[in-house]
Image (spheres, rainbow, N blue to C red):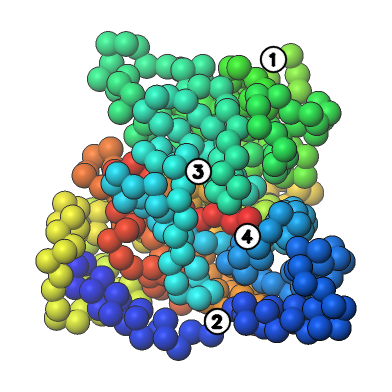
Amino acid sequence: MLRRRLKAEHLKGHGKQENRRKSIFSKRRIHSTLCSYEKRNGMGNWSDLDEDILRLIIDKFWTIEDIVCFGAVCQSWRSVSVEKRQQQQQLCPWLMLAEREGSDRRGFYSLSTQKVYHMNLPGARGRRCWFSHGWLITFGVDLEMHLLNPFSQVQIPLPPQSTLPHQYSPESKFSSPEELLKDFIRKVVLSSRPSLSVKTTHCEANEDEKCVIMAISSKFNTLAFSRLGDKVWTAIEGEIAFRDTIYFKGQFYGVHCSGRLFICDICSPQPKTIEFSSSPLGILKYDNSFLVESLGELFMVGQEIHDDFDLEEDNEDYLDDDYSDSGEDIDNYSDLDEYPSGYGTTKGFDVYKFNFDNRKWMQVKSLENCAFFVGNNTSLAIFPSNQYPGCEPNCIYFTDSSDQGSYYETSGHDMGVFRMDTRKIQPHYVGLDIFSRICNPLWVGL
């Protein structure tokens, strides 16, 4: 059944791609603008264009692909594009697809154009990845961890996995590098965007301006942090069983599996967690939680996942009509047979907004003109408009953040678009390059 649904959506997607509106400002329009400027000013070298002119041009761009292409022209254009990335409000992110075995080439799917763009990304080959503030955090079987900028290819070393707290004993069957790669680290996020000029273990920024990296790891899902230049991770004492963490208004917060919110005090001599709020009612039904910042407000997204093997009838209720059975079959989707029907797929989401006055979570039924992007990334909130073709408001775009690759041959199948108004789920991308034994697809931005 799932194979036939994927086939139907895959065929339907081809028709949509032909009719989808492309980015507002095309390369042809850029070329025309620059040629006109060249004729008026007698310039023969576009790399000599005044930076103010370049800023006027790049300010018209609202998609990642346009900004990346702009920065690829020459060094002076790249400098302006880097400046744009650092100042830019959230753009509609790309979906970084699963790697092809034995290849450095990685696909990135654009919701705006419904096209897959390819880049060589050798620093991510064979490594698990998370994304935060313009950088990938990578972790491999060598147990080394790095920050990797997917567009500049700059890498910054982080402390190795072996310095995280609560290591498995050498006798444990989970202590091999392959097992540690699968499920020792749950998530990694950054407090801010590190400087692109940082290429060693040292950061030139002042102590207060250093980028802080926060990790949730071990079988206990404990918190640990490091700063650029640190050789080891620093454990945060206190509560365990965290599901997500976020840097919000100068402070790291962590959400517990019970829905309680904790402050992460990393400035004291003995870093610790401090309980900041109680749980909202009904929170225990969620299998995963994500923290999201939007317009200075803090939100929690609760994700409920099917855990029953016999869900065929239930799936018919919650899946959108776009998943309807076409009666066709795909032999190439044989990997899907490794999954029990419906097991490990998303049932739905609920959203809560935090009130800092009374320290309570309040459920919200609508995101209004906002869209959330959650998964193995620092959660994003953007405001779709005509400038963001392909992205719709009042939706949650999610990727597979499970560790089912630890139990089945591949994972990555549980992703889609959850509509808050209808509580239905649609796919946002369909293809074989979502399945991975190492790194599920995830959202990436500039």
Task: Please rate how many residues cluster around mark 4, counting C-alpha atoms within 10 Å: few if below 14, some from 14 to 19, many from 20.
Answer: few
Please report contact status of discs 2 and 1: CB closer than 8 Å, yes or no.
no
Disc 1: CA contacts within 10 A as few (<14), some (14-19) or many (>=20): few
- Residue 72 numbered mark, or none: 4
- Mark 1 / mark 4, whichever is N-terminal: 4
Tell me the kind of residue under disc 1. Gln
Residue 7 location (% of width, % of height):
23, 74
Left or right? Give the position of 435 relative to 107. left
Q: Which residue is mark 2?
A: 22
Q: Amino acid at mark 3?
A: Trp
Q: Which one is closest to the eye, mark 2 or mark 3? A: 2
- Mark pair 2, 1: CA separation: 52 Å
Q: Is residue 264 above or below residue 307?
A: above
Relative horizontal placement of residue 111, taking residue 83 as reference (left or right):
left
| Cα–Cα span, label 1 and label 4 | 46 Å
The picture quadrant where one finds residue 178 is top left
Which amino acid does the dot numbered 2 rest on? Lys
Where is mark 3, residue-wise? 130
Name the residue located 78 percent from the left edge and 39 percent from the top edge: 250
Above or below for 126 versus 309 = above
Secondary structure of the residue carrying tag 3 is strand
> Is residue 104 visible to us here?
yes
Dot placed on the residue nearer the N-terminal end, 3 or 1 = 3
Residue 401 is marked as none
Q: Nearer the viewer, mark 3 or mark 4?
A: 4
- Report the residue at 46% width, 47% height from top: 121
Query: Which image quadrant: the C terminus?
Result: bottom right
> What x and y, as percent, mark residue 268?
75, 19
Query: Could you tell which of marks 2 and 1 lies nearer the N-terminus?
Result: 2
